[in-house]
Image (spheres, rainbow, N blue to C red):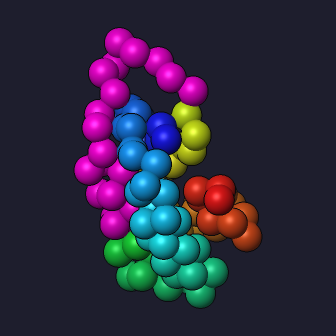
Amino acid sequence: MIVRIMGEGQWKLADDKLDQLNAVDTDLEKAVSAGDEDGFRTAFGALLEFVRSGERVPDNELHDSDAILPPGDSTLAEMRELISGDGLIAG
């Protein structure tokens, strides 16, 4: 799975990491839905950190992204506009 963080680049995550990725995304969705600013910051930071723990795709390579995350400086209000009932990561 290839995940892009806007403004940073792409990371490759092993397919067996999808369940963990979805769990972190669910935490983010719950915090955003509750309007919990601290929970949002914690969960979004954890999601970005999880993605960054994958293998960085070199900038000179371009792959289709399976998921695209907003930049790390996104606000709770911006995230509310982006998150659907499935969170940021579909699946």
Check residue 61 for magenta coloring: yes
Q: Residue at x 49, y 77 (%)?
A: 27
Q: Nearer the viewer, residue 90 or 88?
A: 90
Q: Residue at x 33, y 58 (%)?
A: 50
Q: What is the quadrant of the C terminus in the image?
A: bottom right
Residue 87, image x and y in percent?
62, 65
Q: Nearer the viewer, residue 4 or 1?
A: 1
Q: Is residue 15 left or right of residue 80?
A: left
Extreme-right residue of the structure: 85
Against 22, residue 72 (above or below) is: above
Residue 60, image x and y in percent?
35, 12
Check residue 42 for magenta coloring: no
Q: Residue at x 34, y 19 (%)?
A: 59
Specify whether residue 73 is in view. Answer: no
Span colored in magenta: 44-64
Q: Residue at x 49, y 41 (%)?
A: 1
Q: How many marks?
A: 0
Against 79, residue 37 (above or below) is: below
Extreme-front residue of the structure: 16
Residue 20 lies in what quarter of the image? bottom left
Q: Is residue 85 left or right of residue 10?
A: right
Residue 13, image x and y in percent?
39, 45
Against 17, residue 23 (above or below) is: below
Residue 24 lies in what quarter of the image? bottom left
Extreme-top residue of the structure: 60
Specify whether residue 76 is in view. Answer: yes
Residue 82, image x and y in percent?
66, 57
